[in-house]
Image (cartoon, rainbow, N blue to C red):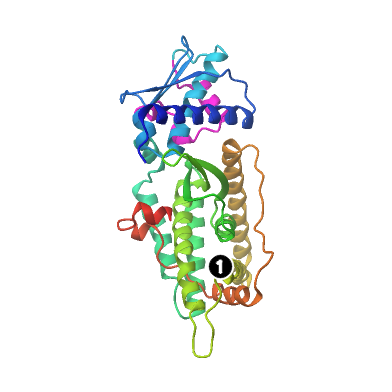
Amino acid sequence: MTIDRDSQERAWILQLVKEFQEIVTYYGVHLSQPFIKISDTRSQYGAWSHYTRTLTMSRALLEEHKWDVVLEIFKHELAHVWVSERGRDDDGDPHGFVFQQACRRLGVAPWARSASVEIDPETARSHHRQLSEDKERQVRRVEKLLSLAQSSNSNEAALAMERARQLSLQYQIDMQSEQRNYTYILINHQKKTMPAHQSSIASILCTHFYVDCVSRSQYDADSRESYKALEILGSVENVQIAEYVYWYLWRELPQLWKVFSMPGPGVEKKKRSSQRSFYLGVLNGFHTKLSREKAAAEAAKLAGTDSSGTALIALDKGLERILKQELKSFVAERFPRLNRGGTSRSGLEADAYHSGVARGQTLELRQGLNQTSKTLTLTERNS
């Protein structure tokens, strides 16, 4: 369907007005409604004029970028509105301390708080999420260990998984003196509701991989519809690892179901309605497996050791508390009023669920997103 230019522009402006109203309500700030204008300029994707009270968004930005990028630049401009309406200035620096304070107040993503984001948002975001060679190497080592945790020997598999966890934690210990960059990624399958197994994957990531996950609505400018999206938040390196795990589990579940539901001699094909129960069983079994491996590793450190084992566990737990507090502060900036809901397990089919649990307790992480990113299409990533 061809959409004429004026109709498209009206739809953008109406959505931005709606976003403005939701932002000021959600973050509890008082801002007067600005005049929102769409421009044809490519030299600046977003701009705010105090004199005319005009907030300008570039047509190129709206046409060529996902709405989460559009929204962060829009919030960036609203931070300028916040500063100008309060008559505050940073000695002529439009992106100085007062502006940064406004960005935190409005939950602007860290990558979108610099002047460069108005010119080149993709570069600003990629630079913020870019890891040094040493950090990149460390993340790849963790992912390699995760991919190797597929030994038929359960002890070897558990050892590889726990080694990956410890390597990740040791890396956090080593960089305590450095400033950790916090970021997010958005996973949008363009569904109106979030399936229960996606919420369960998010729970696994939050429990075991030092990230937080938030379900939120995300507008899509092409379809003019809003969909449920999953935002994964954490330090840049932890988000990368969590994304790796997410895509592995997301793609593995249908493959496991295909094997489970296949009819055998004298066995009927499993009903499609059993799929949800099987998926949740697999994920619950995998969660139990990870928890068991972590507890076993801590017990092994304490068994037959001197006080050094206890000291190391205390150090690990102390760092985990620091990481959780840092993450909590970052999430609180982005989402100051979270309403978290659990995954409903009502109406599960016992046979499919318990079969899933048994399979999940033997599930080993293999190939995730990063090892296949060169061949993974955008359609596959959003499916």
Quadrant of the drawing holding the N terminus: top left
- Residue 3 at what x, y percent from top left? 37, 35
Tell me the SS state at disc 1: helix
Span of residues in magenta:
93-119
Q: Amino acid at mark 1?
A: Tyr
Of 218 and 336, nearer the camera is 218
Between 11 and 368, the one nearer to me in the picture: 11
What residue is disc 1 on? 279
Residue 248: % across, % down = 45, 63
Q: Residue at x 47, y 13 (%)?
A: 91
Q: Nearer the viewer, residue 280 or 193?
A: 193
Q: Is residue 138 visible?
A: no
In the picture as drawn, the residue positioned furthest to the top comes out as 51
Q: Is residue 97 magenta?
A: yes
Q: How many marks?
A: 1
Name the spot of residue 110 as percent of width and height, x first.
Answer: 48, 35
53 to 267, vertically: above or below: above
